[in-house]
Image (cartoon, rainbow, N blue to C red):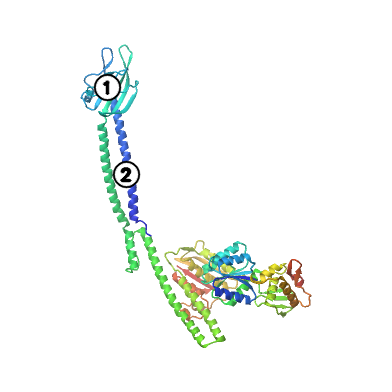
């Protein structure tokens, strides 16, 4: 099952983030603009009231009256959008601005002195922003007369201004979003191009048009492509090894099978039994050896580092159990943290065969040492057994000798170990140990 | 000695049972891990041979289960692949030895013998108590240096008594360890075997190596024999 493409995921995610970001930004800007508009409006209304109060005069009895020439010419022009009315303590109209000519004014509310009452007023004449402001006016006798000054401004200009701001905000944000989306699409296409190239290259490898991924890939991908190449390499090596093992297996089983088939026709009784007894272990050796060779994983992309100490410890514990009666003392000196770059099963097989030989042929002592070597590791396994004569040391590894041509019954441990070591570009050297027996040194890269 | 063979390959299992019975062991067979577990929990075995690749419950899981439930008899594992990782896992799970298929019957018998001796705390295949000497490898018995001719059941009885010398062994325990599951048990037969054994080992009646403890069972006496 394939999931959504990375490109689609990134576009979707980035678009959602962009929409959320720009949407919230737009809302915040709109709110801030409206709030500052309203604050300015209040300031302005208060300014009109103060201007009217500054222009106010007193009549003969000391009562408040306003002159003909008003501080803002809009108070004097009918339908100018700016209106004012002054009411007395009893609610009666004391003064109306000339701009109110032919209009009724319902906006005024009586308020106590010093109180500022901002409100929004709507009637058939339109909608207005209103400030009712209470003052006390001292007359000639020194008595306080209460008045309410009401100033009212047409709300439409402010609303038009806000609407215009919104439109231009939308246009700019929309334009910016579109640009960002386009830029993002281009960046993603460019950024993801190496992935598409890798996919194309893999397809070519699958079709057989090329052997490995050979393009120049960015750093982030080169780890992946190197691993893929390594996997391709190990898959090919395994396939070749299986094929060779199968060929060898088929070829080397044919000889004992031919012997047995001939014997069934010609021999009988003890002679036949003797031949079967001789050929069956030989066939078993062939099968075991070829299976072990084919099963070795070799250096592959998936072989992790294996702690050598743990494998040696587990093998020794198991073999001490098996050879308990022999009372073999096993000394281990494996460097802390020593790692083998390869397959765990291969290391078990390699060391299992060698350590088993040491337990089998040693008299009472086995010594295993392992440490880092330049560019690899060296593991030495020694015993105090009879040892191997120098002129037999190469022959015992049976390198380059096909299995069916080897002497049966020699055991297959050493040559399996040698095959595995060579899979890892390593080598096995057989020498003499100061314990008295064999010293097998395995160098692995 | 009573053994359990857990092996799913029918032909191999039957060959094993036959070979082991010929060598005088009482043997039961199980065809899969579940059956093996049931039998190992149900009957007192002296040793089990367990194949690693079993259906229902694999050999390693079976051994772990048996060890976790206090079954401490020796276990020999059979492996077809013979990989070291598999052998190590089997031995770590609680097996005592391994054998890679195909194996020579004599090799199997030698390993069994060594494991049984080891579990009885003996260093060599010969058990010598006073003038009586029993060789678990060749199944030969001698008294005062003279070979004693025993039937298969007499040998089994004597081997079990001698490997558990000094310990009181009930008739039930003896029956369970020398007969396999399908045998018709009759404790009178056991008494007949004991009487015959006494006669063959100690015709003069001076040694009396097998002591009868009324209501409790038998004991092979090392003290009086030596």
- Which circle marks residue A22 in the picture? 2
Task: Classify mark 2: helix, strand or loop.
Answer: helix
Name the subunit of mark 1: A
A185 or A96, which lies in front?
A: A96
A389 or B103, which lies in front?
A: B103
* Mark 2 surroundings: few (<14), some (14-19) or many (≥20) residues within 10 A: some
Identify the residue at the far top of this view.
A141
Q: Quadrant of residue A93?
A: top left
Name the subunit of mark 2: A
Say whether residue A364 is left or right of residue A442.
right
Which quadrant of the figure contains the N terminus of chain B?
bottom right
Callout in the foreground (1, 2): 1
Residue A126 in picture, x, y percent from top left: 26, 29
Marker count (numbered): 2
Q: CA distance from mark 1 to mark 2?
A: 45 Å
Residue under label 1: A85
Residue A381 in picture, x, y percent from top left: 53, 70
Task: Classify mark 1: helix, strand or loop.
Answer: strand
- Which circle marks residue A392 in the picture? none
Say whether residue B20 is left or right of residue A262.
right
Determine the residue positioned at 54% across, 87% down: A268
Identify the residue at the far left of this view.
A77
Which quadrant of the figure contains the C terminus of chain B?
bottom right
Q: Tell me whether the residue at label 1 lies in contact with that at label 2, contact meaning CB atoms closer than 8 angstroms.
A: no
Q: Is residue A92 above or below residue A224?
A: above
Say whether residue A262 is left or right of residue A214.
right
Q: Quadrant of residue A140?
A: top left
Determine the residue positioned at 38% across, 61% down: A224
A426 or A115, which lies in front?
A: A115
């Amino acid at each position: 099952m394939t999931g959504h493409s990375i490109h689609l995921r990134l576009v979707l995610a980035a678009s959602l983030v962009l929409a959320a970001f720009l949407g919230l930004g737009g809302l915040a800007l709109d709110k801030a603009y409206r709030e500052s508009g309203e604050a300015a409006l209040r300031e302005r209304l208060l300014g009109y009231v103060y201007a009217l109060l500054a222009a106010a005069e007193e009549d003969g009895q000391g009562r408040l009256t306003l002159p003909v020439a008003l501080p803002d010419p809009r108070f004097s022009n009918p339908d100018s959008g700016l209106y004012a009315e002054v009411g007395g303590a009893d609610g009666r109209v004391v003064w109306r601005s000339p701009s109110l000519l032919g209009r009724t004014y319902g906006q005024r509310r009586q308020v106590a002195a010093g109180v500022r009452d901002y409100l929004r007023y709507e009637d058939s004449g339109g909608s207005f922003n209103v400030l009712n402001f209470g003052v006390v006016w001292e007359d000639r006798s020194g008595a306080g007369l209460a008045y309410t000054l009401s100033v009212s401004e047409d709300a439409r200009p402010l609303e038009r201004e806000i609407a215009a701001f919104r439109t231009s905000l939308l246009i700019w944000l929309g334009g910016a979003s579109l640009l960002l989306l386009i830029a993002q699409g281009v960046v993603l296409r460019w950024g993801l191009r190496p992935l598409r190239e890798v996919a194309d290259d893999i397809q070519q490898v699958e079709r057989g048009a090329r052997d490995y991924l050979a393009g120049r890939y960015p750093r982030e991908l080169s780890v992946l492509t190197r691993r893929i190449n390594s996997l391709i390499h190990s898959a090919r090596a395994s396939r070749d090894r299986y094929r060779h093992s199968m060929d060898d297996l088929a070829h080397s089983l044919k000889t004992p099978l031919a012997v047995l088939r001939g014997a069934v026709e010609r021999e009988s009784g003890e002679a036949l039994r003797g031949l079967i007894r001789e050929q069956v272990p030989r066939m078993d050796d062939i099968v075991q050896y070829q299976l072990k060779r084919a099963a070795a994983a070799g250096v592959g992309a998936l072989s992790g580092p294996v702690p050598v100490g743990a494998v040696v410890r587990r093998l020794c514990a198991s073999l001490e159990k098996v050879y308990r009666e022999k009372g073999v003392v096993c000394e281990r000196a494996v460097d802390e943290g020593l790692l083998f770059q390869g397959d765990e099963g291969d290391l078990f097989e390699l060391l299992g065969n060698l350590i088993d030989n040491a337990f089998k042929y040693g008299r009472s002592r086995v010594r295993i040492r392992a440490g880092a070597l330049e560019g690899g590791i060296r593991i030495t396994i020694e015993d105090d057994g009879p040892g191997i004569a120098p002129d037999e040391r190469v022959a015992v590894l049976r390198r380059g000798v096909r299995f069916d041509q080897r002497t049966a019954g020699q055991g297959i441990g050493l040559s399996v170990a040698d095959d595995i070591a060579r899979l890892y570009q390593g080598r096995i050297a057989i020498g003499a140990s100061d314990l008295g027996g064999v010293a097998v040194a395995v160098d692995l890269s | 000695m009573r053994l359990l063979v857990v092996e799913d390959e029918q032909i191999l299992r039957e060959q094993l049972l036959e070979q082991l019975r010929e060598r005088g062991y009482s043997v039961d067979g199980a065809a899969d891990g579940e059956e093996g577990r049931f039998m190992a929990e149900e009957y007192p075995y002296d040793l089990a041979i367990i194949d690693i690749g079993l259906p229902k419950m694999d050999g390693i899981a079976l051994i772990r289960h048996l060890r976790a439930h206090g079954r401490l008899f020796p276990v020999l594992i059979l492996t077809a692949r013979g990989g070291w990782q598999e052998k190590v896992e089997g031995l770590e799970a609680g097996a005592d030895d391994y054998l890679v298929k195909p194996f020579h019957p004599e090799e199997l018998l030698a390993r069994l013998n060594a494991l049984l001796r080891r579990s009885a705390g003996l260093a060599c295949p010969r058990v010598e108590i006073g003038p009586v000497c029993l060789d678990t490898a060749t199944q030969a018995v001698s008294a005062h240096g003279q070979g004693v001719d025993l039937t298969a059941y007499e040998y089994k009885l004597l081997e079990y008594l001698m490997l558990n010398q000094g310990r009181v062994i009930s008739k039930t325990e003896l029956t369970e360890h020398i007969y396999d599951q399908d045998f018709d048990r009759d404790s009178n037969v056991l008494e007949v075997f004991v009487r015959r054994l006494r006669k063959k080992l100690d015709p003069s009646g001076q040694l009396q190596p097998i002591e009868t403890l009324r209501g409790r069972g038998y004991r092979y006496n090392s003290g009086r024999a030596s």
